[in-house]
Structure formats: C-alpha cells, structure tokens
Amino acid sequence: MTSIHATAQVETSAIGENVTIGPYCVIGPDVVISEGCRLVAHVHVAGHTTIGPRTVIYPFASLGTPPQSVHYKGEPTRLRIGADCVLRESVTMNIGTTSRGETVIGDHCLLMTGAHVGHDSIVGSHVTLANCATLGGHAEIGDYAFLGGLCAVHQFCRVGEQAIIGGLVGVTRDVIPFASVIGHRGELAGLNVVGLKRRGVSRNAIHALRSAYRDIFFGSGTFAERVETTATAYAEDANVMRVVEFIRATGKRRLSLPREMSDGD
C-alpha cells in the first residue's frame, strides 16, 4: 500500500504501488515514481523525472532540477533513474539540456552522500559514486565503475566499465575499461584487479588483460600501431576488445595514461 506523509507536498499522480513518501518531501507534477520506491524524508523531486522501481532516496536529495548551464532555457528535458538504486543524503542530479535531452542513471547504483550527476550524463548500472564524487555535464560512466570520494570527472569525459577512480582524483581525460586511476590529474596505475576478481573474472582473463595493457601502453611502435597490434593479437578476447573499442571511440579526446608514458606518445 502506498503511504504519503501528511506533511509531504505531492503534485503528481504517477505513483506506483507500495511507494513510501516520507515527511516534508516535495514532488513536482511531471515526476513518475515507480512501485516500491521509498523517499525517506525532505526529498525534492522536480522536472520530468522518472524514478525506477524499489529505489530508495535519503533526506535532502534534490533530483530533476534545471541543469547548471547558461544555455538552458527551460526546455522539457528529462532525468531517468533506474531500478534498485540507493541515493544517500544530499545527492543532486539535474535534467538534461537540449544537447542530449536527458540525464540517465542505470540500475543498482549507489550514490553516497553529496554525490552530483551533472546534466546529460549517462551512468551505467551497478555504479558507485562515493561521498561527494562529482560528474560534469555529458560525462559517461560505464557499468560497475567505482568513483572514490571527492573525485571529479570533467565534462564530456568517459570512464570505462569497471574502472576505479581514486579519492580526490580529477579526471580530465577518458579512462579505459578495467583501469585503476590515481593522482591529482588521473593517471593510470594499472588494472582494477580487485574489482575483476570480485566479479568472478578468471585468472586467465585477468592475465590476458594485463598483457594487453602492457602491449598497448609500453609496447613498441606508435600508440595507434600498438592498439591495432593488440586488437589483432587478442581478437577473440572480449574483455581486451572492450578496451580496444573504447580507445578507438575516443577520437580526438585524450586518454588517461600511465605516469611512465610521456604526453607526446
């Protein structure tokens, strides 16, 4: 049975079964709240925002407010949050701009206290943003990525699947899948081996990724040549090819590199 506290201000009628809306929540007219969601208290949801089933939102979260962009002129863009997410205290998310039209959060995501998702960002499923992790506009975060506390991802940057970003890191370049990133400006520190093991990736598959990592970043020839050589050598390895395709899709954007490499490579 749906429960709405007497102090909550709820303008929408698009509320699923077994939803709990706690004290002093404010819900706008264009919000859709799916079945089984729980808004603990003091939650503000505005704009064209859809919240997926069984998502739990803690006090002082603010969702669906206008993008922090001087180009936004009030267009009816969207925020879409997936199922089974947990949004802790003071999480903020903005709707999109007309550039992409929506901000998207996948399923089973955990956003800890003070995390922020900027306009037009796309966050995959099973992603964790630790306390005060921040995404600039148009950021893209792959499935199972982990972003450490107080890190910041620059606008338009991509973080590949199952990468781990250390605390206080400023990500200003694309991060390949499965990478571990440390340092003030986001340098590669190898692979996220702990995360790979926790997801049950086999020892042989991890060894293949390590070998491919060395070939791409420390092999002979130019960087472009090394990527294509690796693609040929590991054409049957799905994980390595995810890294290769990510690099190929980077285009003119810059990649995070190991500290040992020069920026000119």
Image (spheres, rainbow, N blue to C red):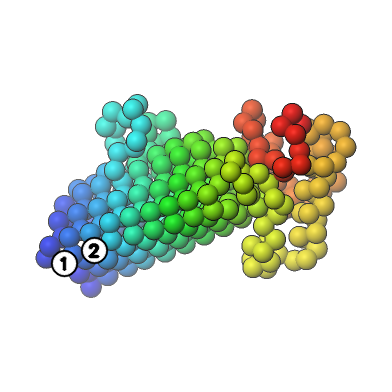
Quadrant housing the C terminus: top right
Q: Is residue 40 visible?
A: yes
| 132 on left or right of 26 | right
Q: Is residue 35 above or below residue 96?
A: below
List x then y, in percent, for residue 66. Answer: 30, 38
- Which numbered marker is on residue 262? none
- Residue identifier under label 1: 5
| Quarter placement of the N terminus | bottom left
Q: Position of residue 112 (x, y in %)?
A: 42, 59
Q: Is residue 51 left or right of residue 4?
A: right
Q: Could you tell me residue 33's position as x and y percent?
A: 29, 57
Is the residue marked by circle 2 packed among few (<14), some (14-19), or many (20+) residues within 10 Å?
many
Numbered disc in front, either 1 or 2: 2
Using the rendered view, name the quadrant where residue 186 is placed: top right
Q: Residues within 10 Å of mark 1 (few under 14, many from 20)?
A: some
Q: Secondary structure at mark 2?
A: loop
**Residue appearing at x 62%, y 46% in the figure:** 183
In contact (CB < 8 Å): disc 1 and disc 2: yes
- Identified at 82% across, 37% down, the residue is 226
Mark 2 — residue? 41
Classify mark 1: helix, strand or loop.
loop
Q: Quadrant of residue 260?
A: top right
Q: Residue at x 40, y 39 (%)?
A: 119
Location of residue 34 (image quadrant)? bottom left
In this rendered view, identify the residue nearer to me: 19 or 170: 170
Q: Looking at numbered disc 2 in the image, what kind of residue is underneath it?
A: Ala
In the image shown, does 79 or 177 lie closer to the viewer? 177
Q: CA distance from mark 1 to mark 2?
A: 9 Å
Marks 1 and 2, the one that precedes in the sequence:
1
Query: As shown in the figure, which amino acid type bears the numbered disc 1?
Result: His
The residue under the point 82% across, 42% down is: 218
